[in-house]
Amino acid sequence: MAEFAKNKAVKSYKFAKFTTTPVYRAYNPNAKMGTHHYTKSKSEYDTIVKLGWRAEKIAWYAVK
């Protein structure tokens, strides 16, 4: 196995360059079953947090 890895070693990688955007997550603590809202809009996120949703910050970064 070590010989295979040695003979088949990758000398370099080429990665594509991606542009990303944050996806925000908020939780509604007033819903009976609980619910999450995801949005790329910071202003939408800020608005629902002001309305009582629990801020959970950035959930992940999505590729544009």
Image (spheres, grey):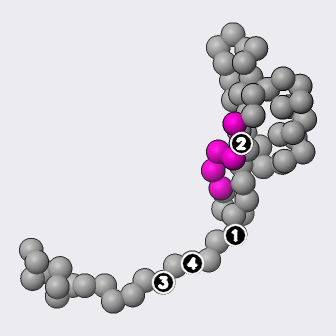
Distance, label 1 to label 3, CA atoms, is: 16 Å
Q: Residue at x 69, y 47 (%)?
A: 58
Q: Is residue 12 magenta?
A: no
> Does residue 60 appear to the left or right of 22 in the view shown?
left
Distance, label 2 to label 3, CA atoms, is: 32 Å
Q: Is residue 58 magenta?
A: yes
| Pointer 3 residue | 14
Magenta residue span: 56-61
Disc 2 marks which amino acid? Lys
Find out whether the residues at labels 1 and 4 contact each other: C-beta distance under 8 Å: no
Q: SS for tag 1? A: loop
Disc 1 marks which amino acid? Thr
Disc 4 marks which amino acid? Ala
Q: Which mark is residue 19?
A: 1
Q: Which mark is residue 8?
A: none
Query: Which circle's residue, 2 or 3, is located before the other in the chain?
Result: 3
Distance, label 2 to label 1, CA atoms, is: 20 Å
Disc 3 marks which amino acid? Lys
Q: Residue at x 33, y 89 (%)?
A: 11
Q: Quadrant of residue 10?
A: bottom left
